Image (tube, grey):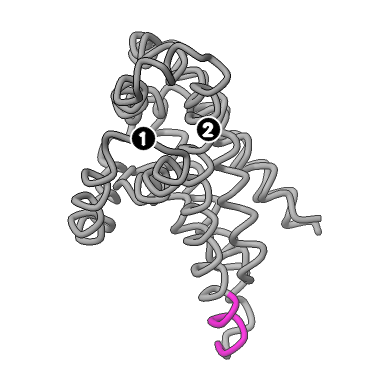
Amino acid sequence: MNVSPVLALVVGLFSALHCIGMCGGIMGALSFSLSPADRADWRRFSLFLAVYNLGRIGSYALAGAVLGWLGGSLMATASHAGWHEVLRWLAALIMVGIGLHVAGWFPQFARVERIGAPLWRRLEPLGRRLVPVSSLPKALAYGAVWGWLPCGLVYTMLISAPAQASPLAGALYMAMFGLGTLPTMLATGLLAGRLYRYARVPHLRVFAGLTILILGLFTLVFEGYN
């Protein structure tokens, strides 16, 4: 049984404080960039927020599919019989690192954001041209661009995606992570960024980080017996 998609969902859920700190300002700005009429109609407002996030999660899934294909290709061509075991251990260690980072004990882990900086320099001007967002297609396009924002947590999850060893599994893995972040992002948009103060509560960060760390270790042991 592959529990990785479930783990990715849980990591997304327990990364709420990181997401508020990283993207809360973006969601608040996007909310205020809508027309007064769209903001006044809570159904349409909620629809815009959902479409933003659909584009974002779609980009996660696309990147996961590419890296899942890459991992599967490496496993198919590598002569080392233990290549899958190497990827499994790498994914588990990455989860431990994410847990330490979310808890606030490993801030250096965010340096992985540098991986996506060159791509973001090319995409960020495109995102600017889509603002103000005046239609649902533009909201979807903006969300798709937003999905490539250099975020240490997202890029770290992508580093572990090759362990899924197929495009479909990689896409599912990253989509589940994105779905885990969805409740926080929707709430942040609806409340216009007022959740930001919770991102700085130390005890909440430690609890969330330790939960991710323990789940990463549990998954390593669980999959080792299957």
Q: Is residue 77 left or right of residue 158?
A: right
In which quadrant is the N terminus drawn? bottom right
- Quarter of the image holding residue 107? top left
Total tally of numbered discs in the picture: 2
From mark 2 to mark 1, how far is it between C-alphas?
25 Å
Q: Which mark is residue 134?
A: 1
For the point 63% across and 71% down, the residue is: 166
In front: 22, or 209? Answer: 22
Mark 2 — residue?
A: 181
Residue 72, image x, y percentages = 60, 77
Residue 149, image x, y percentages = 31, 46
Magenta-drawn segment: 72-78
Q: Secondary structure at mark 2?
A: helix
For the point 31% across and 43% down, the residue is: 109
Q: Is residue 223 left or right of residue 54?
A: right
Residue 225, image x, y percentages = 79, 56
Query: For the residues carrying marks 2 and 1, which lies nearer the camera in this image?
Result: 1
Q: Is residue 169 left or right of residue 42?
A: right
